[in-house]
């Protein structure tokens, strides 16, 4: 049975389809569990990874980690007094973050840990990896099906308004655009790929044209 990765536009129905598919073919649906494993690998809290994952690729910490050496801050985070040593980014970048990173996470550590965790999960049977660049990390692995779920903006707005009838169309569209922007920037920042690049995916389902039930039926036949 192949490993499955799921990439989804926000409010496209992808979350529901992924959960139904995983249940139907008896796959482990891995989403928040990935966060827990990254937290364990980086030796930071689950909440810190969640917060960093949400904003870490667009905030100041991520930017700084690309242009200066943050080793001094990592060390000072663990102890009040340290001896500062000057290291250039280029020199630091040659050394993998396999050393102790207890109590600290930056964009480089996060990327290494997410790649390590998803690569390891990709070796397990019957797993579905949701989001977090799985389609990029496992793209060269043969026994993988990378699935993309999309929908028109109008249908995505309608889905949100079913969940919250108080949302105006303008408000719903703003939420969708913000969520999509974060996903797009996440893939660009960590993997230098275009989230919308069709070449990253083996299957693209448009739920504006295909019902959720039909999508689950087709994907079940494909992945079984």
Image (cartoon, grey):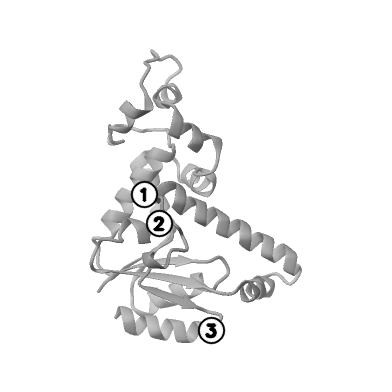
| Viewer-side residue, 219 vs 67 | 67
Q: CA distance from mark 3 to mark 2?
A: 25 Å
Q: Secondary structure at mark 1?
A: helix
**82 in relation to 26, above or below:** above
Q: Residues within 10 Å of mark 2 (few under 14, many from 20)?
A: many
At numbered mark 2, what does the secondary structure look like: helix, strand or loop? loop
What percent of the width, then of the height, locates residue 129? Answer: 37, 63
Residue 153 location, quadrant? bottom right
Q: Which mark is residue 133?
A: 2
Mark 2 / mark 1, whichever is N-terminal: 1
Which is nearer the N-term, disc 3 or disc 2?
Answer: 2
The image's mark for residue 114 is: 1
Residue at (76% x, 68% y) in the render: 166
Q: CA distance from mark 1 to mark 3?
A: 33 Å
User: Looking at the image, which residue is at 28% across and 36% down?
Assistant: 96
**Real-space CA distance between mark 2 and mark 1, rounded to the nearest whole angstrom:** 9 Å
Residue 218 position within the rendered picture, expressed as x and y whole percent measured from the top left: 39, 85
Mark 3 highlights which residue? 209
Q: Nearer the viewer, mark 2 or mark 1?
A: 2
Task: Please report contact status of discs 2 and 1: CB closer than 8 Å, yes or no.
Answer: yes
The x and y percentages for residue 35 are 42, 51
Residue 129, placed above or below residue 26: above
Q: Classify residue 211 as left or right of residue 126.
A: right
Residue at 37%, 23% in the rendered image: 88
| Placement of 49 over or under 88, stated as above or below | below
Labels 3 and 2 touching (C-beta < 8 A)? no
Q: Nearer the viewer, mark 3 or mark 2?
A: 3
Q: Which mark is residue 205?
A: none
Label 3: state its secondary structure: loop
């Amino acid at each position: 049975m192949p490993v499955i990765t799921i990439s989804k536009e926000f409010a496209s129905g992808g979350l529901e389809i992924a959960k139904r598919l995983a249940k139907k073919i008896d796959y482990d649906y891995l989403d928040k569990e990935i966060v827990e494993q990254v937290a364990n690998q980086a030796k930071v809290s689950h909440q810190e990874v969640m917060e960093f994952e949400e904003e870490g690729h667009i905030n100041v910490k991520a930017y700084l980690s690309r242009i200066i050496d943050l080793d001094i801050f990592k060390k000072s985070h663990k102890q009040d007094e340290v001896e500062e040593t000057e290291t250039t980014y280029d020199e630091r970048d040659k050394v993998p973050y396999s050393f102790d990173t207890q109590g600290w996470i930056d964009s480089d550590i996060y990327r290494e840990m997410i790649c390590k965790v998803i690569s390891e999960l990709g070796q397990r049977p019957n797993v579905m990896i949701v989001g977090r660049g799985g389609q990029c990390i496992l793209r060269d692995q043969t026994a993988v099906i990378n699935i993309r779920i999309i929908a028109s903006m109008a249908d995505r707005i309608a889905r949100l308004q079913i969940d919250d009838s108080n949302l105006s169309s303008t408000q719903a569209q703003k939420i969708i655009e913000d969520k999509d922007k974060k996903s797009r920037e996440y893939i660009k920042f960590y993997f230098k790929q275009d989230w919308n690049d069709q070449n990253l995916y083996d299957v693209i389902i448009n739920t504006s044209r295909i019902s959720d039930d039909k999508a689950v039926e087709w994907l079940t036949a494909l992945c079984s």
